[in-house]
Image (cartoon, rainbow, N blue to C red):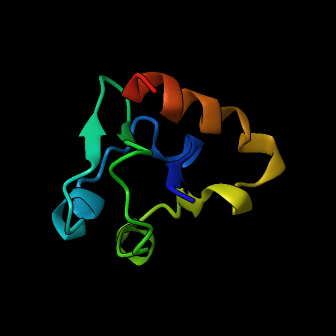
Amino acid sequence: MPHIIAEPCIGTKDASCVDVCPVECIYETDDQFYIHPEECIDCGACVPACPVSAIYPEEDVPAEWESFIQKNYDLSGV
């Protein structure tokens, strides 16, 4: 399962997660980053790198941010 970037990233956009991603599957929009689900290898390197704890394995996204699962898919065109 890919990782999902949720609400805490909005407005913060710290690129620490981008720097540690070994497959460069994290992309930027105007207000946040998102992870391309077909490119993510589920290594988890981005999770501890995120200073605002916005990255979760898809199956562990908190209920209040579940809408970000679809948002990440929509942003990636999947």
Q: Quick one: which residue is furthest to the right in this view?
A: 63
Q: Quadrant of residue 62?
A: bottom right
Q: Residue at x 26, y 39 (%)?
A: 27
Q: Total marks drawn?
A: 0
Return the x and y of residue 65 as percentages of the image width and height.
71, 42
Tell me: residue 29, above or below residue 51: above
Q: Residue at x 51, y 31 (%)?
A: 73
Q: Residue at x 56, y 45 (%)?
A: 6
Tell me: residue 5, above or below residue 29: below
Left or right: residue 17 versus residue 59 is: left
Return the x and y of residue 35 as percentages of the image width and height.
39, 46
Q: Quadrant of residue 34?
A: top left
Residues 12 and 38: in front is: 38
Residues 15 and 39: in front is: 39
Q: Quadrant of the N terminus?
A: bottom right
Return the x and y of residue 55 as percentages of the image width and height.
51, 59
Q: Quadrant of residue 46?
A: bottom left
Return the x and y of residue 40 as percentages of the image width and height.
37, 56
Tell me: residue 67, above or below residue 21: above
Q: Residue at x 59, y 63 (%)?
A: 57
Left or right: residue 14 versus residue 41 is: left
